[in-house]
Image (tube, helix red, strand yellow):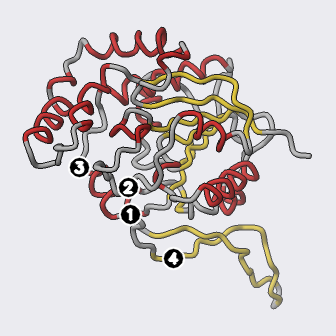
Amino acid sequence: MSEVAYSKNETLIDGQDIKSDVPTVEVVEKQDRSPYLVNRLLESKEKNLFNHVKFNLVKQEIDKLGLANPKILDIGCGLQVSRQYLEALNLQCEYFGIDYEPRFNPDLVVDLLNPGDAKDHFHWNPDVVLMLDVLEHLHEEMPILEDLLAGVRSLIPDECTMIFTLPQMYRLDRFKLSHLHYPEHKIRLHQSEWRKLLETQFDVHAVQGVGYVSVIPYLPMASKRYTPDNKLGKMFNYMRSSLFEWGPFKPIDLWLSNTIGKLNLFKTVSNDIMFVCTPKKRS
């Protein structure tokens, strides 16, 4: 895939070069930033227990805004699974997805470490901005992530709603176990650390656990004997890809997320944590 960049178009009128505001398309070849992640997502099933719960919760938050046709900006959109799920949930919206991975075919290829660069490439202010399971893939240093969030803040209007999801029990990230290493998670943080990071640029209005049944397959990873290829690894793969994809688990896990997921005691033992925020007012 190629990055699309816009430039002023020069038009010859009555023998003179006149600069117009009509954009021309300039093609810039891009390579994958994270080949392992790209290949894994391209090969993974998009419809699964965790995504079912996550996108139902995201839709619930968007519905609370009461907008007839919300404008949604999806930062780190990946394969635009957000759009597919939200459309399947009958959400009528305008959608624009940006990502740094060209093979995902986003609406715009953008360096996600500099998200403010996307500002001139969509011509409306979003009502909702999604950043779903993205931050953990971008950098291992907190100051860099703080600058990244400042770039996101510069990209969006004061009155929009920002929805983040971030890992907790996913691959047991919150415990930061030394024997577990998932190369595409650059940083592993506890809920309180994620919140502190987000609050550099956003006011957090709601926090909710996302997925409880879907946590169970990750429990074998707690053993120091776990490797992807041994019996514990095979148990994990079977539970995640088959056993816990049984259809009746979907309403159960959604119900758990909407009940115990709102209780402080249980928010850190969910698969993900969802933060619903608004941008801090510019001084």
Among the two numbered marks 4 and 2 on one chain, the one whose residue lies closer to the N terminus = 4
Residue 251, above or below 148: above
- Label placed on residue 184: 2
Q: CA distance from mark 4 to mark 2?
A: 25 Å
- Label placed on residue 43: 3
- Residue 154 drawn at (x, y percent): 76, 52
Instruction: Left or right? Give the position of 107 relative to 24.
Output: left
Among the two numbered marks 1 and 4 on one chain, the one whose residue lies closer to the N terminus = 4
> Toward which corner of the image does residue 20 lie, by quadrant?
bottom right
- Label placed on residue 28: 4
Marks 1 and 4: CB-CB under 8 Å? no
Among the two numbered marks 1 and 3 on one chain, the one whose residue lies closer to the N terminus = 1
Q: Nearer the viewer, mark 4 or mark 2?
A: 2
Tell me the kind of residue under disc 4: Val
- Residue 52 drawn at (x, y percent): 37, 25
Among the two numbered marks 3 and 4 on one chain, the one whose residue lies closer to the N terminus = 4
Q: Residue at x 51, y 37 (%)?
A: 190
Marks 2 and 1: CB-CB under 8 Å? yes
